[in-house]
Amino acid sequence: MKRLVLSLCFVFAMVATATAQDFRVRIVNHLQMPISYAVITIEGAPRAVTDINGEVEIDYRRIRPEYRLAAHAVGYQSVEREIGQEGMTSGEIEFQLPLNEGIVADTDVDQTSDQIREMFEKAAGESMAMDFNCTLASAFEFEYMGHKASGEFSVENLVDSNELEYFREKGWCHLPIDIRMNEGSSSSVIHKLDESIHYALSELNFAIAAIGHNRHFYKYRPDYALLGTNANGSLQYYRISFPMLATKATQIVAEVDMAQQQITSIKILISDRNTSIIKHISSNVEPILPSKKSKIPALCPKDLAYNYSTRYAQLTMQLNEVVITPSDKKR
């Protein structure tokens, strides 16, 4: 009897080990090259981020045959599919992501991340983040959980202020926002709107600081890739991806005007497993000299689209006609 019990325990241990194995996901591009730090969602919620080799393993206990997996990488079109019984049996699934429309693929696959970083720095010129005293004003369109609002707002940014220290860590310490709502707007979303403006501008500035003049301020080295160009070769598209920092991973695509040697637009994807939020930020940017004595321009938004999604909520915000006025004001 004792021997039978020991045998059963051994069998159960083997079964538990088998069921605890990992499900492998691999993300590649059109050239079968790995896409690093791509986001994997399960039923719409971010659950994993690929490594430098475009691979990640997910605990089998988190998945079911009927679950839908999706792969997201900024600069590429997202792809979604059901795991299915075949996927459960093989224990792996591969996603091939096509480039966004309008990007002509780069075919030089022999370039390393460091070589592409050098290309990017030469092509993009020198610029810095919005770390200067100024006033920002914009029109907005906003929607959260079916409640809509529109209007205008203005906000001061004072880098030497002691207020809102959390945001100052991100290099954009803007003070309370003056929001003027249009007639018919839902007043119930004003707190969420205020929060969204703060986060959208802060995270845009964070990305600009990472790839601009202060591109080395990250503790972790990003991965650089050249996605390609536009049809006539006047624009280049670089993808800069950061590894998982705590629960968050960040991907950036910078559009560079080759003639002007200037970044003209930025697209950002941020995934946070802790909050199950995926954020998208897209902005056309322009260089602004913070003061008459400035020699290095700051990249500032001309417009900004911000949205995030969870399994339960959707939020969208569009900022238009953004005007930034440098200020010598001190706190």
Image: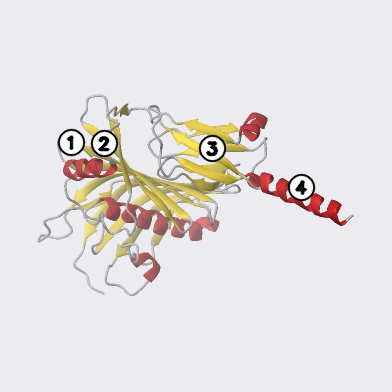
C-beta proximity under 8 Å, tags 1 and 3: no
In the rendered structure, find residue 182 and report the number of the disc placed on it.
Answer: none
Residue at image mark 4: 11
Closer to the eye: label 4 or 1: 4
> What's the distance in space between the residues labelled 1 and 3, CA to CA?
34 Å
- Say whether disc 4 or disc 3 marks the residue closer to the N-terminus: 4
Q: Amino acid at mark 1?
A: Met
- Say whether disc 2 or disc 3 marks the residue closer to the N-terminus: 3
Is residue 316 among the parts visible in the rendering? Answer: no
277 relative to 331 in the view: left or right? right
Residue at image mark 3: 70
Look at 28% across and 59% down and name the residue there.
217
Residue 8 vertical position relative to residue 80 in the rendered view, above or below: below
The residue lying furthest to the top in this view is 231
> What's the distance in space between the residues labelled 4 and 1, CA to CA?
64 Å
> What's the distance in space between the residues labelled 2 and 1, CA to CA?
19 Å
Percent coordinates x, y for residue 19 in the rendering: 68, 45
